[in-house]
Image (tube, rainbow, N blue to C red):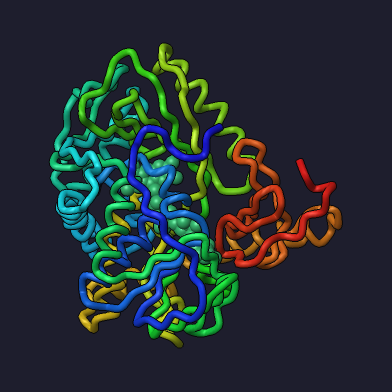
Amino acid sequence: MSEFPTWQQGIRQDYPPLRGLCRVDAVVVGGGLAGVTAALMLSENGVRTALLEARALAEGATAGCAGMITCQAIHALTTAARTRDMAVVRSYAQLMREAVTGVIALAQRLPQPCDITACDAFAFAETEDDLPALHRLMALERELGLPVAEGTDAGGCPFPVERSALMKHQGLLSPLPYVLGMAEAAALLGCQIYEQSPVRRLEGHRLTTPQGVVEASWVILCTGAPLDCHDRSLLALMAPRLRELRLLTSAAPLHSAQLSVHSDEMTLRPCQEGLLMTWDRGAYGTDQADGAALIRDRTLRALLPESETRQVILRREVFSRDGLPLVGPLHPRDSRLMMATGFGGLGLTGSFLAARLLTGAVIGRPLPESPLFLPFRRYPGRSAFDRTALLASAKAFVHGLTSPGTPKCPHMGCPLRYNADSGLWECPCHGSSFDILGQVEAAPAIQDAALSPRDRP
Ligand SMILES: Cc1cc2nc3c(=O)[nH]c(=O)nc-3n(C[C@H](O)[C@H](O)[C@H](O)COP(=O)(O)OP(=O)(O)OC[C@H]3O[C@@H](n4cnc5c(N)ncnc54)[C@H](O)[C@@H]3O)c2cc1C
């Protein structure tokens, strides 16, 4: 299994590790889509910014991104419509619609070409059984003011579909050159970018990496789950999931289009080498993910019998339980310690929206919709979901205490589970992960896990 997607080319600049003391107005932690978009927008608005990335830019969830730019946010919109007021969901849908235009315009002016293409997006019902769900989706999108039309075609889909919901004026790009191009543009505006600079300690607005220290008025955590976060309500609002990106050869090339089954479980798009498929494998760090892999293999054999898998990339992505991104201060006590995550499978448009919200807060021009995305928000039904999520994590925690041989997550002590497919130790409670030597790969954990030689797979 290869680690970085081969289907896209990007010209990497070498950014050094942080050494010594760096004082800036804002420090962004995490060099994925969210962090790099925020760093660029802050720099464009005259904010002295530094960006710290633990490894290399775009190696986290962003390496799995298939590059579909869309506001056909099926999972996010249907989840939000179940848990939030319609007025709130409508504002979110409109901001996402603006973000599609924003991402396309931004991609066109970057120093690196990133294969930006305009295209239609189709959500499709594969069989008659899927039709009611597709019609519910279309009714919701119409109610939210999104331009959706019904059809029988699905952009040259290589297998027959029953019915589709068409949204025009969406887009495709290659995420790696997009991220590297944004970083290059930010650096030209004076943003200090540091790679191989994991934040190991976070004390107020002072951040320590192995060789340096950053002091900043604003700290913005774009690390998937926020670093070293122990707030149980906030942790319970996040839902880490395991998702896969698969590069397939295909006998019948798809037109320029993006396709999703109505539940967003599977998406398809064309690329130069064939087809890109994404698949949701279930809650992170659990057995669910193995079952999903079997279903995916069966579906692939049935729908695309002639395709062959060239590459598989597995990544954790943090969703929110109410469908809306989590962007803004982590808690009301400190409005200058902010975070951005929970894009529900839509990191391109979600990161663009997050960067607008974060930059607005830093330059004193907040968007009127900012309160909708506050990470410490309350919403109807919260107590019910809180109980379920907290019970699940308490159960995992107790299991860890009663199984002395199991490696534990240094974040809050949950037992880790080894995933042979990704080659990582994964935390089922809050989504941290560690390589086979115990080195932390994904937050909220900030420290390495203590693994003994007998824990080596
Ligand atoms: C398979 C798959 C397909 C997808 N397809 C699409 C798509 O077609 N369209 C779309 O819009 N979205 C898509 N997404 C979603 C999108 O990729 C994500 O929402 C987005 O990449 C999240 O970006 P991020 O910056 O929040 O997180 P990440 O990319 O995970 O970035 C977080 C960064 O923080 C760094 N970090 C962590 N801890 C530290 C530390 N202590 N110090 C410093 N740095 C640290 C990590 O190394 C990482 O680089 C897809 C996601 C997946 C997994």
On-image quarter of the C terminus = top right
Which x, y percent locates residue 261? 35, 33
Marks counted in the figure total 0
Which x, y percent locates residue 57? 42, 54
262 shown above or below 74 = above
Which x, y percent locates residue 75? 37, 47
Instruction: Name the residue rendered at 42%, 77% in the picture.
Output: 219
Residue 254 visible, this orientation = yes
Q: Nearer the viewer, residue 289 or 433?
A: 433
User: In the rendered image, which quarter is residue 320 located in?
Assistant: bottom left
Q: Residue furthest bottom?
A: 333
Horizontal arrangement in the rendering, residue 401 relative to residue 144 (left or right): right
Which x, y percent locates residue 181? 28, 53
Horizontal arrangement in the rendering, residue 241 relative to residue 10 (left or right): right
User: In the rendered image, which quarter is residue 147 located in?
Assistant: top left
Instruction: Name the residue rendered at 22%, 21% in the picture.
Output: 156
